[in-house]
Image: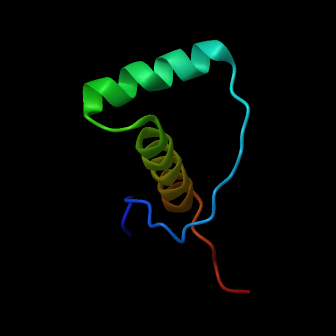
């Protein structure tokens, strides 16, 4: 899965607390990513971790 946004990817407008944005901006700078890329990366990691911890079993 590519974490690089494509121009045809849907966009979402989300409100974040100021501290969360500051923390995301700092993490993005450390990791050499944009704020958006940092958010996408972290969400993808979280979802992958959830899937590994709770695999879906066939019914």
Question: Is residue 38 found left or right of 29 in the rendered image?
Answer: right
Question: Is residue 5 found left or right of 33 in the rendered image?
Answer: right
Looking at the rendered structure, the number of numbered marks drawn on it comes to 0
Q: Quadrant of the N terminus?
A: bottom left
Task: Pick out the residue farthest to the top.
Answer: 19
Task: Pick out the residue farthest to the bottom.
Answer: 59
From this view, report whether residue 59 is shown above or below residue 16.
below
Q: Residue at x 38, y 38 (%)?
A: 34
Q: Residue at x 62, y 64 (%)?
A: 10
Q: Tell me the colour scheme of the image.
A: rainbow
- Residue nearer the viewer, 54 or 32: 32
The x and y percentages for residue 45 are 45, 49
The x and y percentages for residue 17 are 69, 19
Q: Residue at x 63, y 57 (%)?
A: 11
From this view, report whether residue 6 is shown above or below residue 16.
below
Residue 32, image quadrant = top left
The x and y percentages for residue 50 are 56, 53
Residue 51, image quadrant = bottom right
Q: Quadrant of the C terminus?
A: bottom right
Q: Residue at x 44, y 23 (%)?
A: 25
Question: Is residue 30 found left or right of 55 in the rendered image?
Answer: left
The x and y percentages for residue 47 are 55, 55
């Amino acid at each position: 899965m590519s974490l690089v946004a494509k121009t045809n990817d849907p966009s979402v407008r989300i409100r974040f607390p100021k501290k969360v944005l500051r923390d995301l901006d700092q993490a993005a700078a450390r990791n050499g990513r944009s704020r958006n890329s940092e958010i996408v990366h972290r969400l993808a990691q979280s979802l992958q971790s959830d899937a590994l911890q709770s695999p879906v079993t066939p019914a």
